[in-house]
Amino acid sequence: MTPAVFGHGHLRLYLLHVLAVQPMHGYEIIQALSDRFGGTYVPSAGTVYPRLGKLEADGLVSRLPDGRRTTYALTPERRAELAARSAELDEIEAGVGDSVRRLADEVRASVGEAMTSLRAELAAATREARDEARATGRRVDENVSVVRGEGRERLHRADRR
């Protein structure tokens, strides 16, 4: 299981920090967090929207109608609080950087394991193709080229994920 990206209460403060840059609607907030984490962490709508509702109920953000979307903006009092809590935000930012590195390492390890497994499968399939070619009298390179073509396609599909 992947450890939590944010410590207790830190996502709440970080959402306020994100909204301090400019008012945003929920999807923009999700995108801003995803961008900040280099795509390694994308909070779900089920994570962001309830917290935005709680921030609104606590008087920390206000909702601004924006066509079919709802844009969230900090209340003036919260800007002053964010300024007062800048040291805590700096710590959260450092933690976010550590989380991004940790998540990226996990992704790299997972991809590496998948590639190792795929290479082993391709090697086994090549051996089987050679054995079959020998048994049937077909040319070895015909069977191997078919297997390699299938392997390349599998590698391309894996790269696209």
Image (cartoon, helix red, strand yellow):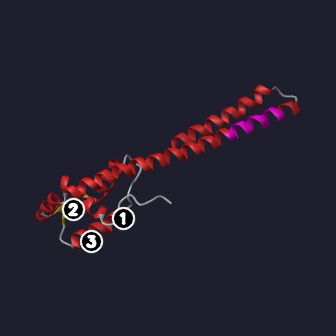
Labelled pair 1, 2 in contact (Cβ < 8 Å): no
Crowding near pointer 1: few (<14 within 10 Å), some, many (20+)?
Answer: few
The residue labelled by disc 3 is 54
Q: Residue 151's x, y, as percent?
A: 65, 36
Q: Amino acid at mark 2?
A: Tyr
Q: Residue at x 22, y 70 (%)?
A: 56
Q: Which residues are magenta?
A: 120-132
Q: Residue 91's x, y, as percent?
A: 27, 55
Q: Is label 2 in a helix, a strand or a loop?
A: strand
Nearest the camera: 9 or 51? 9
Q: Earlier in the sequence, mark 1 or mark 2?
A: 1
Q: Residue at x 35, y 60 (%)?
A: 6
Label 3, label 2: how far apart the Cα atoms are: 12 Å
Q: Residue at x 42, y 50 (%)?
A: 40
Helix, strand or loop for the magenta stretch, by majority: helix
Figure check: 63 above or below 18: below
**Nearer to us: label 1 or label 2:** 1
Label 1, label 2: how far apart the Cα atoms are: 15 Å
**In this picture, residue 36 sits left or right of residue 3:** left
Q: Earlier in the sequence, mark 1 or mark 3?
A: 1
